[in-house]
Image (cartoon, grey):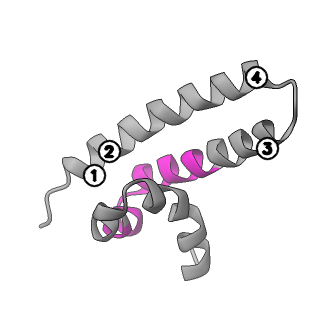
Amino acid sequence: MATNEVVECIRPLLARFSENEETVRRLVAMDESFDALCHQYRHVIDLLESCKADVGHEAEVEQFEQRRARLEEQLLTRIEGYQPQ
């Protein structure tokens, strides 16, 4: 994956967990499952922003917010549990 793609993929995650930038970058580079979670997180953030822009999508916004929260929990658990080797 090109550097610009990595940056775009993790930008929302870094905005949320800026204090863990180094760990996030390492995990994205070394752990495919963490990278996949980052892609899911970015996708949900994009969908959430899109739904918020459209009036009448309150139920979808709530679903995406719940999904975002679950992904953030999974990502934070992985970030906090990271042990450099």
Mark 4 residue crowding within 10 angstroms, few (<14) / some (14–19) / many (20+): few
Q: Secondary structure at mark 3?
A: helix
For the residues bearing labels 1 and 3, Cβ distance under 8 angstroms: no
Q: Nearer the viewer, residue 18 or 25?
A: 18
Mark 3 residue crowding within 10 angstroms, few (<14) / some (14–19) / many (20+): few
* Mark 1 residue type: Ile
**Mark 2 or mark 4: whose residue is earlier in sequence:** 4
Which residue appears farthest toward the bottom when viewing the image? 3
Q: Residue at x 58, y 45 (%)?
A: 40
Q: Tell me, yes or no, whether the highlighted magenta stretch contains residue 32.
A: yes
For the residues bearing labels 1 and 2, Cβ distance under 8 angstroms: yes
**Mark 1 or mark 4: whose residue is earlier in sequence:** 4
Residue 6, by quadrant, is bottom right
| Residue picked out by circle 2 | 76
Which residue appears farthest toward the top when viewing the image? 59
Q: Tell me, yes or no, whether the highlighted magenta stretch contains residue 68.
A: no
Q: Secondary structure at mark 1?
A: helix
> Which stretch appears magenta?
25-42
Q: Residue at x 70, y 49 (%)?
A: 46
Q: Main secondary structure of the magenta part?
A: helix
| Residue picked out by circle 3 | 50
Give the Cα separation between the discs numbered 1 and 4.
31 Å
* Mark 4 residue type: Glu
Mark 1 residue crowding within 10 angstroms, few (<14) / some (14–19) / many (20+): some
| Residue picked out by circle 1 | 79
Give the Cα separation between the discs numbered 1 and 3.
27 Å
Q: Nearer the viewer, mark 2 or mark 4?
A: 4
User: Which percent across, then down, holds residue 53?
Assistant: 82, 42
For the residues bearing labels 1 and 4, Cβ distance under 8 angstroms: no
